[in-house]
Amino acid sequence: MPSTKNQTKNGKAAVTPCIAIDCEFVGVGLDGVRDQLARVSIVNFHGEVIYDRYVRAIEEVTDYRTHVSGIKAHHLTHAAVTFKQCQRDVSELLSNRILVGHAVHNDLSVLLLSHPSHLIRDTSKYKPFCPDRRPRSLKVLAKTVLGITIQTGSHDSVEDARTALVLYKKARVEWEKMLYDKQHRRFPSSTSASASASASSASASAAVTPLPATSSTSSAISSSASTSASTSVHGQHPPAAKRLKSSAAAADLEAAERRQQEKAERNRRRKLMRKQQKLEKQNR
């Protein structure tokens, strides 16, 4: 008879932050094609059993699937727990813990439970275990990855949970690194964002060419500073093309200022020449 207890030094297995689950199903409905929960087994990170219960069927069982599930009619008698009780127990064990399993979505679906995706480690979906993107059965992974043989007869949910756990532990370092890198790319740390903002601000400042302190250039500098501040707040590097464009615009503005000054000087000289010519005529 399955039990929640597993004899250890303190008489009971500890519930660790990482646990593994496997369930056995029976068939209900016409031709027994619909899955109904019949047994739930959960082991801790050390492979020790922390929960193992048969579950009384809610509907009439039309196919015990004994050759696969190992479930027989006497397993689902009064000694088994109710579905609601099992659901509460499992929900409590899963809370805020990493859940390992093979095709975990099937187990959660029959339990009518959900679990945060970032806390699920599903060996049927780990890409290095499925190089051609086709999920392998737990039996095949056990043989090819671990070199062991399981499920020689009917399935044992404790054995299957332990096998999924060993697969996860074998790939754990690379698996967790892959998840960390994926999350890190999506959500950069505040330190990285701050550094990016500082670099952006410095780059924007370096790209601005100093101009004479005229009213038009002051306005342009204020506009440029406002743009740089906005960019720094969002922590984004302005593209190189934009930085070059900004520098070119500043140079064009400076050249325009020089042209205006030269034009003004030419006009002043013309006026002086005309005035001198007029005075010379009058003196004649």
Image (spheres, grey):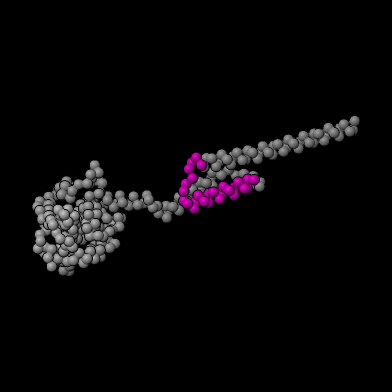
* Residue 213 falls left or right of residue 234: right
In percent of width and height, residue 69 lies at: 13, 55
Residue 162 visible in the shown view = no
Tally the numbered discs. Answer: 0
Corner quadrant of residue 16: bottom left
Residue 270 percent across, percent down from the top left: 77, 34
Residue at image position (9%, 63%) is 74
Residue 96 drawn in magenta: no
Q: Nearer the viewer, residue 210 or 96?
A: 96
Q: Main secondary structure of the magenta part?
A: helix
Q: Position of residue 100 (x, y in %)?
A: 23, 56
Q: Which quarter of the figure is the C terminus placed in?
A: top right
Q: In the picture shown, does residue 221 fall above or below 35? A: above
Q: Quadrant of residue 19?
A: bottom left
Whether residue 162 is situated above or below residue 277 in the rendered picture: below
In the image, residue 236 lies in the stretch drawn in magenta: yes
Query: Residue 256 at what x, y percent from top left?
Result: 64, 38
Q: Which residues are magenta?
A: 216-242
Any part of residue 230 in sight:
yes
Residue at image position (67%, 37%) is 259
Pick out the residue farthest to the bottom: 10
